[in-house]
Amino acid sequence: MNQGSLAAGGGKRRAVALGNPEVHAWQEDGVWHVDAVTPLAPFPARFTDRLVAGARTHPERTLVARRGLDGEWIRLSYAEVLHNVRRLGQALLERGLSSERPLVILSGNDLEHFQLALGAMYAGIPYAPLSPAYSLVATDPSKLRDLIEQLTPGAVFACDGTAFARALEAVLPDDAELILARGELAGRTATTFASLLATEPATIDARNEQVGPATIAKFLFTSGSTRKPKAVITTHGMLCSNQQMLLQTFPFFFDAPPVLLDWLPWNHTFGSNHNFNLILAHGGTLYLDSGKPAPGLFDASLANMVKPHLH
């Protein structure tokens, strides 16, 4: 079935294809039950298969981009991301990371986080993106410390050692490797993100072949708005089936690759399992928004929407 939608910036309407699943509904003891009985079409066994396919079919297309200090977009293509992901995955694999010793990411949405997350998934190593607010806003490190103790990480990444110094000094385990994109932490040796990128892939592709639907992709924490945050185990099969469900619900993703300018955090299911994954699953492009719908920050979002820069 089709439904019109308003095009951004004008009054024109365009038809978009929507799914029409078969639904079974029944009433029992005064409660309505609704079950979508349309089966899912086949989907990949590993979420990173989408990256591999994209690098093969549209290698030069921008996968992810962010503004640089000069205001211009720094772009990474599908081919470039896969090239880097294989190296990052190899580096993480050589460190013996696992579900018992996962990768923890403290910092928010950036190009390094994007590639490390995919590198970990490519290697079959779970990662856990934590809210940057636990490190940068909270004055009491107890909640962050509790999350670290739950995870027992083998490695912890932060984009900037100086910005995250207070949190790292409070919670970084002695036996966890510190990885930084820039900056340093006084009294602690850190591995640079650049050095991980210099790792030559050796066994990573063979390891990737062993990753399957039951392999844990990430630990995503609940918000903790009622009680302590809890780690939710999220597998490759869950991520892949979710995107197939979305495609069958919104088949207009077949019409053109989606393009998003997005600020939603990757430690939240909307920003990560939906938006992050939506782009990769359907060959799209993700522009990282440096603004937010908040006072003093929305102007940055408006500037990022200027069409000449989004191409």
Image: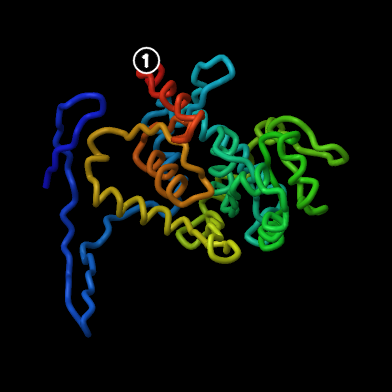
Left or right position of 103 against 6: right
Residue 108: x %, y % from top left: 58, 40
Q: Is residue 78 visible?
A: no
In this view, the residue in front, 55 or 38, is: 38
In this view, the residue farthest toward the left is: 1
Q: Quadrant of residue 307?
A: top left
Pointer 1 residue: 308
- Identify the amino acid type marked 1: Pro
Q: Quadrant of residue 27?
A: bottom left
Question: How many numbered badges does the structure rendering display?
Answer: 1
Left or right position of 279 against 107: left
Q: Is residue 195 above or below residue 221?
A: above
Left or right position of 119 against 199: left
Look at 77% across and 50% down and name the residue there. Answer: 172
In this view, the residue farthest toward the bottom is: 29
In this view, the residue farthest toward the right is: 187
Look at 22% across and 85% down and name the residue there. Answer: 29
Residue 237: x %, y % from top left: 43, 58
Residue 106: x %, y % from top left: 65, 45
Look at 38% across and 43% down and name the residue there. Answer: 278
Q: Is residue 126 above or below residue 75?
A: below
Q: Quadrant of the C terminus?
A: top left
Left or right position of 196 against 4: right
Residue 181: x %, y % from top left: 68, 33
In this view, the residue in front, 280 or 222, is: 222
10 Å crowding of disc 1: few (<14), some (14-19), many (20+): few
Q: Find numbered disc 1 in the image and state the secondary structure of the residue it sits on.
A: helix
Q: Is residue 56 visible?
A: yes
